[in-house]
């Protein structure tokens, strides 16, 4: 499993937002996180859609966290951006196994599923607050 650059950037953007006590504009977030402004806006849109960030329009607009940093886990954000955590594509429901159409009979499916669940549990146990501290 590889966490995409977009998830990495989303975590950076959320961390930057958590460090501010007030609204922050996209340009400032872009500058602070070294993410292009265009990509910052794309990620912010997803974070707003996921209800982790609130946006304010207008001249005095900007972005703020919509939840406490203690309530935002790394798993939540990675899954928002990249989808369910799975170390193998065979764990995705749309994929069929070339070796065994019955995924439940495949030993590798069980091994990869267990590892994916362990990774997901670890990521669920780390919050933005933890990262800041």
Image: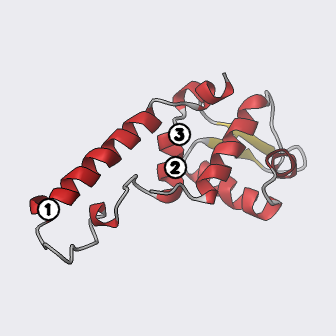
Residue at label 2?
78
Q: Position of residue 109 (x, y in %)?
A: 21, 58
Say above or below: 72 vs 101. Answer: above
What's the mark number on residue 106?
A: 1
Structure colour scheme = secondary structure
Please report the residue visible at 80 percent of the width from the left and 45 percent of the height from the top. Answer: 62
Please report the residue visible at 79 percent of the width from the left and 47 percent of the height from the top. Answer: 33
Of discs 2 and 1, which sits in the foreground?
Answer: 1
Please report the residue visible at 81 percent of the width from the left and 31 percent of the height from the top. Answer: 22
Say above or below: 103 vs 47. Answer: below
Of 76 and 112, nearer the camera is 112
Badge 2: how crowded within 10 Å, few (<14), some, or many (20+)? Answer: many
> Could you tell whether 98 is left or right of 78 in the image?
left
Of 66 and 106, nearer the camera is 106
Of discs 3 and 1, which sits in the foreground?
Answer: 1
What is the distance, in whole Å, between disc 3 and disc 1 at their CAs?
30 Å
Please report the residue visible at 79 percent of the width from the left and 27 percent of the height from the top. Answer: 21
Residue at label 3?
74
Q: Tell me whether the residue at label 2 lies in contact with that at label 3, contact meaning CB atoms closer than 8 angstroms.
A: yes
Q: Position of residue 24 (x, y in %)?
A: 82, 41
The residue tagged with tag 3: helix, strand or loop? helix
Quadrant (top left/top right/bottom left/bottom right) for the N terminus? bottom left
């Amino acid at each position: 499993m590889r966490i995409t650059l977009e998830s990495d950037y989303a975590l950076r953007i959320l961390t930057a937002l958590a460090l501010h006590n007030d609204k922050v504009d996209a340009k400032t977030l872009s500058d602070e996180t070294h993410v292009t402004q265009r990509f910052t806006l794309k990620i912010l849109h997803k974070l707003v859609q996921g209800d982790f960030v609130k946006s304010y329009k207008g001249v005095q607009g900007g972005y703020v966290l919509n939840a406490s940093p203690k309530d935002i886990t790394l798993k939540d954000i990675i899954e928002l951006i990249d989808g369910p955590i799975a170390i193998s594509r065979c764990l995705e429901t749309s994929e069929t196994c070339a070796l065994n159409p019955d995924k439940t009979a495949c030993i590798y499916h069980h091994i990869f599923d267990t590892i994916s669940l362990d990774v997901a549990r670890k990521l669920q146990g780390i919050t933005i607050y933890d990262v800041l501290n």
